[in-house]
Amino acid sequence: MELWRRNQFAVTAASFVGFTGFTLVMPFLARYMQELGLTDTGEVALWTGVTLGVTPALSALVSPLWGRVGDRFGNKILVQRALFSSAIAMVLMARASHPWQLFALRALQGFVAGYGPLTMTMATQLAPRDQVARVIGAVQTAQRIGPAIGPAIGGVLAAAVGLRNTFLISAVIYAVAFVLLTAMYSEPAKVARHRESAERVTFGTVLAFENFLLLMLVIFLLQLVDRSFGPVLLLHLTQIGYSAEAAALLAGVLFSTLALSAVVGHQLASALLARASARAVIVSAVLVAAAALSVFALGRSVWVLLPAMAVFGVAIGSAMTTSFTAAHSVIPSHAHGVGFGFLTGSALFGSAVSPMLSGLIGSQSFRVVFLSGAAVLMFLVLLVRRVMVERDLPIEAPAVDEA
């Protein structure tokens, strides 16, 4: 097997296993807070919210920093450190006796364990230029499927062995990801040769790359809209006439549809980029997503809601992978870590802000949450058409001076 393919497999597998382990327990954190002694519903909601939110918030802040460290010293050891520390954090969470301990451990996990941008860098380092979109799509697919199946597995485990033991199983899963990465991934030799040049790359240098700030905004807004369903979907379905039981079932089906269709979109991006420019793919995909979201907002029948959600997921997945691929094309290889750190940080900020905005807008109208998301996507279409610099395909990373 070629080295780049083996590295891609190692990173994709580690991402899938790690993201699955993370979501085994996090959806049931409110119940764990109650086991730790909280009885007031408001306190449970508050502690659960801040404990869940602190990890992506801190990860978003430090992602560019860890990316820069990875550019200088190699990414493998940083991801190994992240997976190992996550395993330890899960063991300690299983032994927590107060809510503040969970919060502190989640905060520590957010600071040291944010390996999403590093894995993206590792997967693309040796990939041929015409395979970059496919590689990015594979990693994003792993990061989608893991959280999609993790809660279901975690629910079974929590019922069978209890929440504390589920944390321990999650720790074992992180350890498996650590072993997979350690055994299979080979750090490219060029990392060492680029250490000196990486020292000359500043955060300002990365942000000045062609289209880079625009693509950060695109990724942020795509994630903002994509994550807006969580707080309001069940309530919206109840409001438009479904019973509580039917709404719960349909919400689960719709969330699964979104996750699986986005996976299709991640894979589709490579084929689309072989036929059109990144700007054309982003504009077309976002336009389709806006239309699908509008239909979803106005629909009532399951036969309208399900297809609209599926089309939306495919379009959002395609636009997201294309945006990361287009950004990759303007980042020199010795700055991939910090570059992907900024990009992933934008996605994480979108994930952190989206539930708050969705809840705020949903307090007035659930339907407006989806319509406002469609409006944001239409704004994005106009912005990309007007501002993004056109590039010929296949998208290629800029040449790096090996001297």
Image (cartoon, helix red, strand yellow):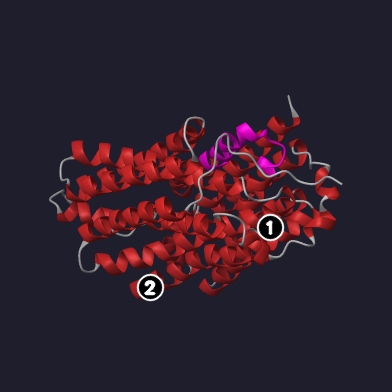
Residue 216: image location, x then y, percent:
52, 58
Tell me the crowding category of disc 2: few under 14, some 14 to 19, or many 20 or more residues within 10 angstroms, Cα based. few
Closest to the observer: 33 or 221?
Answer: 221
Q: Amino acid at mark 2?
A: Thr
Number of the front mark, 1 or 2: 1
* Label 1: element kind: helix
Alpha carbon distance from label 1 to label 2: 41 Å
Q: Which mark is residue 8?
A: none
Q: Position of residue 329 (x, y in %)?
A: 61, 45
Nearest the eye: 143 or 210: 210
Residue type at the position of mark 1: Gly
Q: Is residue 128 magenta?
A: yes
Q: Residue at x 40, y 56 (%)?
A: 383
- In percent of width and height, residue 309 lies at 30, 42
Which residue is painted at 42% across and 52% down in the image?
Answer: 384
Query: In this orientation, which residue lies closer to the viewer: 73 or 158?
Result: 73
The residue beneath circle 2 is: 39
Residue 326: quarter of image: top right
The residue closer to the viewer here, 237 or 367, is: 367
Tell me if residue 62 comes above or below residue 294 in the rendering: below
The residue at the point 56 percent across, 63 percent down is 60
- Work out whether mark 1 precedes mark 2 in sequence or the reverse, and give the earlier one: 2
